[in-house]
C-alpha cells in the first residue's frame, strides 16, 4: 500500500473530500476545532489520483489524537494500515497514548477500534449537540438512524 502525506495532496482535493465525507472541512470535537485541510496525516490514492483512504492527527506532548479516519474501501485493510501508520509516527515522536473520538451512533467504528487495541475511556454526553452550535452540518441521525448526541473517547496505550 502506497501512502502519501496529507500535505502532498492538493488542498482543493482535500477540501472536497472532507466536505463530501464530513459536511465541511471543519472538525468539531470535544478536544477542539480543527481545519482538516491543515492537519498532518496520510492518504492513499487510487489509480486516478482520487483519495480512497485518509487519516489526520494532532501530536500534543506525549499524546497523539486521530481527528479523522476514512476508508472508502472497507474490509480491505486500508483503515487498519492508516491507523498503524499514525501509531508508528506517534511512537517515533515519543507518544505514550493514541486517542480518538467517535459518536454514540457509530457502532461499526467502536467495533473497529476495539479490535485494534483501543479501550473506551470517556463518555461525553451531549457533546455533539454542543458541536452543532459551531458546525450545524453535523446530521441529527447517524448509522442506522440512531440520533447522534454523544462523543465516546477511546485510547490505546502505546508500548
Image (cartoon, rainbow, N blue to C red):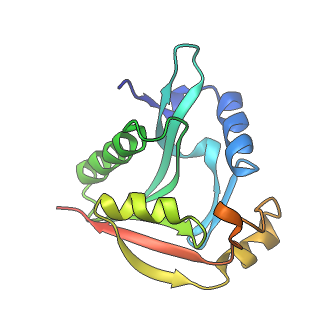
Residue 60 seen by the camera: no
User: Along the horizontal axis of the image, is 38 left or right of 109?
Assistant: right
Q: Position of residue 18 (x, y in %)?
A: 68, 43
Q: Residue at x 63, y 25 (%)?
A: 10
Q: Position of residue 112 (x, y in %)?
A: 40, 57
Q: Nearer the viewer, residue 73 or 45?
A: 73
Q: Is residue 95 above or below residue 56?
A: below
The image quarter in which residue 104 lies: bottom right
Q: Residue at x 50, y 59 (%)?
A: 108
Q: Position of residue 31 (x, y in %)?
A: 56, 71
Quarter of the image containing the C terminus? bottom left
User: Along the horizontal axis of the image, is 137 left or right of 77?
Assistant: right
The image quarter in which residue 80 lies: top left
Q: Is residue 9 above or below residue 58?
A: above
Q: Nearer the viewer, residue 23 or 60?
A: 23
| Residue at the outermost left position | 159
Residue 108 seen by the camera: yes
Q: Position of residue 130 (x, y in %)?
A: 73, 78
| Residue at the outermost bottom position | 125
Q: Is residue 2 above or below residue 122?
A: above
Q: Residue at x 28, y 63 (%)?
A: 117
Q: Nearer the viewer, residue 84 or 61?
A: 84
Amino acid at each position: 500500500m502506497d501512502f502519501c502525506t496529507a500535505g502532498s495532496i492538493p488542498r482543493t482535493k482535500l477540501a472536497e473530500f472532507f466536505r463530501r465525507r464530513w459536511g465541511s472541512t471543519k472538525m468539531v470535537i470535544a478536544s477542539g476545532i480543527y481545519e482538516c485541510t491543515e492537519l498532518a496525516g496520510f492518504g492513499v490514492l487510487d489509480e486516478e489520483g482520487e483519495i480512497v483512504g485518509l487519516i489526520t492527527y494532532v501530536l500534543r506532548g506525549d499524546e497523539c489524537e486521530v481527528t479523522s479516519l476514512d476508508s472508502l474501501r472497507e474490509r480491505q485493510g486500508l483503515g487498519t494500515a492508516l491507523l498503524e501508520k499514525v501509531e508508528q509516527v506517534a511512537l517515533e515522536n515519543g507518544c505514550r497514548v493514541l486517542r480518538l473520538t467517535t459518536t454514540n451512533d457509530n457502532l461499526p467504528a467502536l467495533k473497529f477500534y476495539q479490535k485494534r487495541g483501543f479501550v473506551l475511556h470517556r463518555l461525553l454526553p451531549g457533546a455533539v449537540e454542543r458541536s452543532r452550535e459551531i458546525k450545524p452540518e453535523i446530521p441529527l441521525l447517524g448509522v442506522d438512524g440512531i440520533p447522534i448526541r454523544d462523543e465516546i473517547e477511546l485510547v490505546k496505550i502505546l508500548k
